[in-house]
Amino acid sequence: MRGAEIVAIAMDHGWTDHGPGGKHPYILKRKGALRPVPVRDKLENKEEVRGILKQLEIPKGEWPEKVK
Amino acid sequence: MKSLYIPYEKGFDEETSTWTLTGKDSQGRDFGVAAGRSIEQAEERLKDWIFDSLAASADDAEDRTGDLSSSAPDGFPVIALMPIDLLPIHIRLSRARRHLTQAQMAERLGISQQAYSKYERAGANLGVKTVHQVERVMDEELLEFA
């Protein structure tokens, strides 16, 4: 899965992209969020995707089918 | 400045033969996630994740280094951020708190903006003389953290 897909989901939940960062093309921020969430473009496996979605506080029901 | 630590949990994905590491902040909440073909590669990526997140907070003049643990917790593998790793974050934070741009900092230091931007990057290898020059411009002791 590509980071751009996660960014698109995150934007629907009020996150905005402030990237690029040093090693991440996307740096997602949302007012009131615990902290910024960097996202790489090439994600290695489903667990990495799930971990990012959790830290973005995306409800599980809205996760892509392939990582549910 | 002392070293700070990110304990992490690790898991192996057999489908892709990759490791996934999930960092934990000082309160046990998830702080960063990264994967790689080896634990070493995943650790490097998790360290990059933490740095980029801290740097993004610093851009908003917000110091989140307190989210990291000040000692290595027992029973967990950890990633250590040494003072030299954290110095670019403190420089960035100090600049943001003064509402200065990188270009303004570069001008005050008499260097190019491109050269200055390297001071705030992960892995910046700054000599004592350079840090003292930045301290003079900031009117703040940065090495007290280091």
Image (tube, helix red, strand yellow):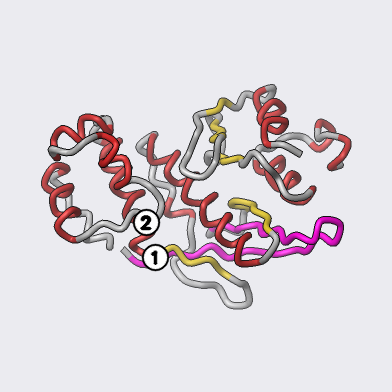
Instruction: Give the extent of the magenta segment.
Output: B2-25
**In this view, A58 is above or below B89:** above
Specify the quadrant that holds the C terminus of chain B.
bottom left
Is residue B23 shown in magenta?
yes
Q: Residue at x 18, y 61 (%)?
A: B128
Distance in Å between CA atoms under marks 1 and 2:
6 Å
Q: Residue at x 69, y 25 (%)?
A: A8
Q: Which residue is mark 1?
A: B82
Q: Are marks 1 and 2 in contact (CB under 8 Å)?
A: yes
Residue B82 located left or right of residue B146: right
Q: Residue at x 22, y 35 (%)?
A: B112
Displayed quadrant of residue A32:
top right
The chain to which mark 1 is attached is B
> Which mark identifies residue B86?
2
Question: Callout 1 environment at 10 Å: few (<14), some (14 to 19), or many (20+)?
Answer: some
In the image, A33 versus A64, the foreground residue is A64
SS state under label 2: helix
